[in-house]
């Protein structure tokens, strides 16, 4: 069996893809800028560093790293050398639009289109809100048990990285996934207020949400992200006040087991919040 190349192998999702493939005794070639000892070193924005890593490889797990445009030459290289690509895209991609309004969706759609044009067998994974995003609250929960933000009543189903990886593994190793666009979500919507409470319970220390005005939240977020990303995120949260994020059954449909609840994720990551 030829090894499967896993890009982003040291990240939250990629590391789970590697672990789950190995649990099935599938040969894996982890790819990262700083790979593990048995991995391959490469930068997805520099196809000349990727070329050696795909020798003897037919199947690749790919994710966006840096700008979408910088990834296009690597996608072209994959089109020449491999047969199957499973791409970790985004639930922000909207197939009903000829032009993506959400910038995050637009970035991922650019890569999707390049993969479609590359002539490989492809599967797109489109996860919605990541449970790992709540790790951004870890410092404030450790400091005083308070998360300060806007739109605490915004409700969404957070997906565990293990569930994203489980679907990826099926698409990487199984048949019947070519041309599929899988929308991935957690098991049920929950507000940001509930998420903080659940994390606190798992960590064994009280944690609560403190609502602040959107303008104040925006100012704090601008210290970490560009303005158009911040405005997109806040706009999305505002919309989730009245229309909670949808729940799909894709994880169970593809893997044959129920998705993992956020309580499971919180328990597994409790140490980060203590």
Image (cartoon, rainbow, N blue to C red):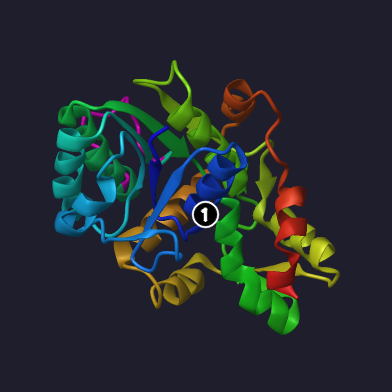
**Span of residues in magenta:** 92-102
Horizontal arrangement in the rendering, residue 158 relative to residue 172 (left or right): right
Query: Left or right: where does residue 41 sit relative to residue 27?
Result: left
Does the rendering let one see residue 244?
no
Asked if residue 19 shows in the view, the reply is yes
**Residue 248 in the figure: left or right of residue 71:** right
**Residue 139, image quadrant:** bottom right
Query: Which residue is under mark 1?
Result: 15
Q: In the figure, is residue 55 to the left or right of 133?
A: left
The quadrant of the image that shows the C terminus is bottom right
From what the image shows, is residue 242 above or below residue 265?
A: above
Which residue is at 44% across, 55% downward?
9
The correct choice, above or below, for 85 with respect to 102 in the image is above
94 or 273, nearer to the observer: 273
Residue 82 locus on image (x, y percent): 25, 34
Instruction: Look at 83% across and 71% down and name the residue there.
Output: 206
For residue 181, which quarter of the picture?
top left
What is the quadrant of the N terminus in the image? top left
Image mark count:
1
Asked if residue 97 lies in the magenta stretch, the reply is yes
The answer to if 87 sits in the magenta stretch is no
- The location of residue 103, given as percent across then percent down, is 29, 49
């Amino acid at each position: 069996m030829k090894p499967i190349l896993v890009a982003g192998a040291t990240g939250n999702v990629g590391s789970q893809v590697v672990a789950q493939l190995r649990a099935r005794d599938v040969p894996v070639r982890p790819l990262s800028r700083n790979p593990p000892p048995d991995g391959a070193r490469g930068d997805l924005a520099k196809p000349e560093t990727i070329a050696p890593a795909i020798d003897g490889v037919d199947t690749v797990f790919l994710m966006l790293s840096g700008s979408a445009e910088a990834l296009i030459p690597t996608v072209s290289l994959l089109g020449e050398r491999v047969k199957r690509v499973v791409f970790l895209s985004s639930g922000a991609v909207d197939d009903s639009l000829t032009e993506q309004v959400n910038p995050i969706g637009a970035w991922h759609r650019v890569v999707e289109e390049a993969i479609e044009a590359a002539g490989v067998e492809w599967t797109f994974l489109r996860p919605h809100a990541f449970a790992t995003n709540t790790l951004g609250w870890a410092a404030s929960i450790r400091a005083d048990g308070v998360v300060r933000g806007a739109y605490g009543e915004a409700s969404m189903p957070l997906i565990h990285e293990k569930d994203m990886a489980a679907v990826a593994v099926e698409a990487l190793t199984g048949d019947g996934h070519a041309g599929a666009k899988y929308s991935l979500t957690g098991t049920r919507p929950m507000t940001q207020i509930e998420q903080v409470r659940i994390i606190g319970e798992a960590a064994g220390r009280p944690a609560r949400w403190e609502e602040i005005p959107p303008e104040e939240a925006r100012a704090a977020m601008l210290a970490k992200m560009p303005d158009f990303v911040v405005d997109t995120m806040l706009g999305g949260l505002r919309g989730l006040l009245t229309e909670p994020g949808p729940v799909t059954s894709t994880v169970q449909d593809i893997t044959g087991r129920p998705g993992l609840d956020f309580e499971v994720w919180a328990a597994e990551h409790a140490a980060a919040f203590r």
